[in-house]
Amino acid sequence: MSNMVQAIRMALHVGEERHGVTDIFGEDVGPPLGGAFTATQGLKTAWNTPLDERGIVGTSIGLGLAGCRNVAEIQFCDYGFNSIDLLKLAGMQNWASNGEWNCPITIMTPVGSGIRGSIYHSHSFDATATHIPGFKIALPTTPRDAYGLLLSCIVDPNPCFFLIPKALMRVRSLPGEEIPGEPGDDRMLAKMIDAPLGDRTSWKPQWPDTPDHFVPFGEARTVRSGRDLTVVSYGRTLPLCVRAAEALVDEGIDAEVIDLRSLYPYDWPRISESVRRTGRVIYVNEDSEITNFGEHLVRRTVDDLFYELVAPPRLLAGAHVPGIGLADSLEMVSVPQLPSITDAIRSLARSEA
Amino acid sequence: MSTSLRPVRSPPASEISPDLLLKLHSLMVKARVLEERLIQMYRQGDGFFWIGGPGEEAFNVPLGLLIQKGRGPQYDYCHFHYRQSATLLAMGADPIDAMRQMKNTATDPYSGGRNFVGHYSIRQWNVVPVSSPIEVQYSIAPGTAIANKRAGGRGITIVTGGDAGTAEGDFSTCLVWSSRPANPLPVLMIVTNNKWGISTHFQGQHGEKRISDRGKAFGIESKTIDGNDPEVSYRELSAAMEYVRTERKPFLLEAMVSRLYGHSSASGANRTNDEADCIAGFERRLEERGLLTRQQMDELRAQFTAELLAAHKQVKEEPQPDPKSIYEHVFADRDLVRGDG
């Protein structure tokens, strides 16, 4: 079964073959490296750019305006902050021209902590991305969702962010969650589509025949059903929320866990249906906590569901500090981890109505 | 003024026919009258803000006439800045539409009342939406130029900006990306140098003698020309475009121009008398050559003035955007740039 990086690679290949992707580009995206995380190995339209994120985003916009669907990579989202005005421009092409132009581009970038990336390889991007109207925003947590969400980004006529939780890039699918058509044997898939070490000049990938599989924007997934409270998360913290929920069964706490999957548009009907049932909700993500996207969800919860609640809605997020320090002791307390998530869920479950 | 690495052949002066000279003149006057009308609209409260290009007509009109306009990568892509109404008029735009944008009416075809005047957007002619940041177009241009090159025709990408905007990193981005040895691009980079960034003079901020010199480091054909002379502009633009169309490589053209009404309405939009007026200079030449009399030129100006006054009156009666429309077009529901729509 594939890991997330392989799933991304297969989706990009399908994008090239069947959905008109003309360019996949960014720093070290083309051969020989095929991406800092190997997500773009073996792709026929992948090419290397100068080390210039503004050029990458700008060129992506230009290609898009010329009708060339493209996927542009910012190697780490931490290096995309110098391009915010260009990203805003991408998001406004349709609106500013009163519907005259659209900009069919995908900006792909790894986000979040979990690889001891220190100050400049650990930033989150969800608060920033959700503050750029005009973009659709996908953030997968499983290889199959990565495949399906990336294909949805590629065929969408609007600019899309495809945010990759870098801590989950090597995580494999659970049984039953395979990408249709992928070989079941991990080693066989690696042999087919992972570039070999050493000289790669004559290497060509053998792509498995994977069909179109679209995960629509705005469709969350209930990963675990539960009675007592609702946990809404995405990215690196989602699997931790599931583990915490499993652990709390022994304490008589039955938590429902929702993977948001796309941040804009987001699946408010699913969240509100769940919260109406449980009366308790906690939003978990690792971006810094002030003007956090989870704060918006808390506000909407208060606006729409106040009289359905039996406890105040909660947000567990990253500390409001400029970056994530390198030392293990620093990273652990800067962003939610399994113990803090477990504690927060337990506390919410036991809070008095 | 040439800083060309190797000489780019300029067509001989005889190629500019008397008919073309008259056409250049007529469009230059029409563009000037339009800008003066837009300033009047601002003064009369028919618009919140004016910005434009009076003083750049001698360069911008030839540019508009030489663009291969059309839709898609076989044609030229235009990444303009906000001083180019003369270019748009020369391409065939109706001046009333600029007035609609000035008055931010619902009928404004470029932005539906959402953007300042001079912020054109015409998909049928590959004029991508003009935006207020003075530099971003230089980073976007390589993208359409890749599409031009791939399409295999003679279409090129034209990107324009002012001298002050070249201090931004995006200008360097365009130099680097259009001259990559891995894939040189058919980009005509234009700088209309009016020597001002709002109230700050070029001389105090820029150590480079000529902006076009910056092309040299990248092996880009580069030239500085007198943009106040429409015949020079026409010839040099023709030569530069022909180079980009046939060689499929970039060219950096710096045109020295005037700024006759200041930066914008924010600085008063008052006529300055200490800069050369390209129309006055050209009209003296046309008169000397016996192509037009002073009376004919006065009549032409009076005719445009009357036409645009009538258009102004019409625009005043047109509706403002519906407040409910703010949520329209946040997202496109179909692929306009790829489909036939």
Image: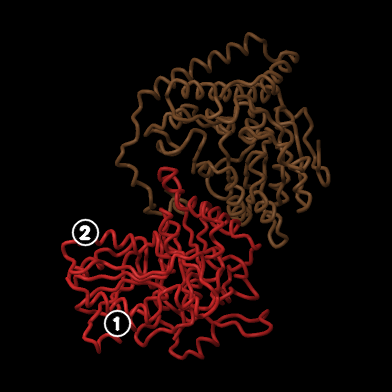
Instruction: Write the residue at 67% across / 28% down.
Output: B258
Give the side of residue A79 with respect to residue B286, left or right: left
Secondary structure beneath dot 2 equals: helix
Q: Quadrant of the N terminus of chain B?
A: top right
- The colour of chain A is red
Instruction: Write the residue at 76% across / 43% down.
Output: B207
Q: Name the residue under label 1.
A: A245
Q: Is residue B169 above or below residue B98?
A: below
Q: In this view, does B120 lie above or below A134?
A: above
- One can see residue A16 in this view: no
Secondary structure beneath dot 1 equals: helix
Give whichever of A316, B209 is nearer the camera: A316
| Residue A304 badge | 2
Chain letter of the residue beneath label 2 in the structure image: A
- The colour of chain B is brown
Give whichever of B80, A330 is nearer the camera: A330
Instruction: Write the residue at 41% across / 66% down.
Output: A138
